[in-house]
Amino acid sequence: MSLKFNLISESAAGGRRAQIDLPHQVVETPVFMPVGTAGSVKAVAQDVVESLGAQIILGNTYHLYLRPGHEAIRRMGGLHKFISWPRAVLTDSGGFQVYSLSALRKVTDEGVRFRSHLDGSSHFFTPEHSMDVQIALGADIAMAFDECTEYPATRERAQESLRLTMAWARRSLDHFRAHRHEVPWHEELGGRTQSLFGIVQGGVYADLRRESAERLVEMEFDGYAIGGLSVGEPREATLEVISEVVPLLPKDKPRYVMGVGYPDEIEQYARMGIDMMDCVLPTRAARHGLLFTSEGRVNIKNRQYAEDQTPPDPKCDCMVCQRYTRAYLRHLMQAGEPLGGTLNSIHNLAFYLGIMRRVRGELAGEVE
C-alpha cells in the first residue's frame, strides 16, 4: 500500500486542506518541506526541526548516492534510520542536480552520464538506476527521473526535454512498480511501500505543460509534481504554469510544486491548490544573514541592528525570537560564529512552517 490522500475541504479559489497518509507520517497539507540535501537540514539538528513542526523533509538522491552511497544507507536500514528522522521523507530523482552540472554531463535517450562534483569520477544515471537508488534510500515519496528544462529555452529545446521526460517517466514507473517492495522498511511497516510522483515539464510553453500533465495522469502516478520552475523565469511565468497545470491534475492525489519559493509565493501557491512545496531558501538565506519576518525581510548584518534589543521578529514565538535580540544575531554574523547561521535558520524555518500552519487553519475555517 502506498500513500492515501484524504481531501478535507476546498476553498472557492481552489486551496485545499488535506491529509497525506504516508508510511512514517500523516502529513497535513498544504505543507512546506524543509530541504535536507545530504541528510541534514543545514545547521539545524533533527530534534529542533521536529520541534518546529516539520512533518516531512527532503533528501537529495544525487548527493546521497555520491556520499555515503545508497547501498551503505540501505544496509543501515534506510535514510530515516541513518539520519535519525522518524517522520516522512521525500527524495528527488537527481535530475535537477544533474541538470545543474551542465558542463559535466552528457544526455542521451538512455540516461545521463555525468562527472561527480566531488572527485570528477564518471557516473551514469538512467531512470531505472534513479529508482534503484531511491528505493534503497527508502523515502516515503520518490520522484520520477526527469530532464529539467532551463530558462530561457527555445520551443524546440523544451519539446526535446519533454520527450525525454515522458519516456523516462514511463521507465521510472515500470521499474518502480516492479521493485517498490524492496524498500528497506517494507516488512517493518506492515508491508507498506513508497509512492512515486511524476514530474510535469515543458518550460514556459502552456501547450507543452498541458501535454506533459495529461500524459502523466494517464500513467497513474501516486502524485504529481510541477518541475522546471525557479530556474530564472519571471514570477508571472511561474504563476501561469501553475494555473495551467493544476486543473489538469487529479483532485484525489497530491500536487507538489518543486523548489519554491519566497514566503508570499508559497502562500499564494497553497491558495491555488498546491499541497506540497519545498525550497532551500529559508536556510540558505539565513546563512547569509537574511531573515524573513512579519515586517518584511531583514538583513541582520546591517549596522542599524548593532544595538537593537528587539527580537528578530516581534510577532514570532519561535525559540530564537523568544530568547535573542537582533543585536546579538548581528554580532554572531559579524564574528563569523556558526551559531548565527543556526539561529537564523531556525527562525526562517519557523516562519515558513508558520505560514503553512496559518493557511491550513484558514482553509479549514478555523485558526490552528
Image: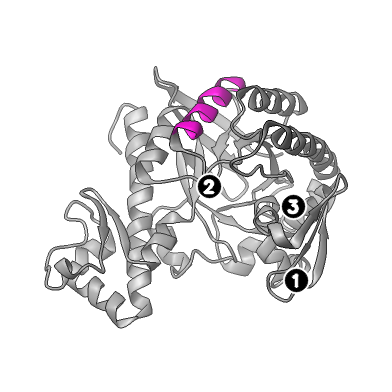
Between 214 and 177, which is closer to the camera in this rendering? 214
Q: Tell me, yes or no, if residue 162 can be seen here.
A: yes
Among numbered discs 3 and 1, the one appearing first in the sequence: 1
Q: Quadrant of residue 303?
A: bottom left
Looking at the image, residue 124 sits to the left or right of residue 211; the answer is right
Q: Which residue is mark 2?
A: 259
The disc placed on residue 186 is: 3
Which residue does the image show at 12% across and 68% down from the upper left? 308
The amino acid pointed to by label 2 is: Gly
The amino acid pointed to by label 1 is: Ala
Residue stretch rendered in magenta on the structure = 236-250
Expressed as whole percent of the image width and height from the top left, the position of residue 340 reads 32, 73
- Which one is in front in this view, the residue at disc 3 or the one at disc 1? 1
Q: Secondary structure at mark 2?
A: loop
Expressed as whole percent of the image width and height from the top left, the position of residue 237 reads 50, 32
CA–CA distance between discs 3 and 1? 17 Å
Q: Tags 3 and 1 in contact by the CB under 8 Å rule? A: no
Q: Main secondary structure of the magenta part?
A: helix
Q: Confirm whether the magenta stretch covers residue 237.
A: yes
Between 83 and 38, which is closer to the camera in this rendering? 38
Among numbered discs 3 and 2, the one appearing first in the sequence: 3
**Up/down of 255 relative to 99, above or below:** above
**Up/down of 220 relative to 54, above or below:** above
Q: Which residue is mark 1?
A: 72
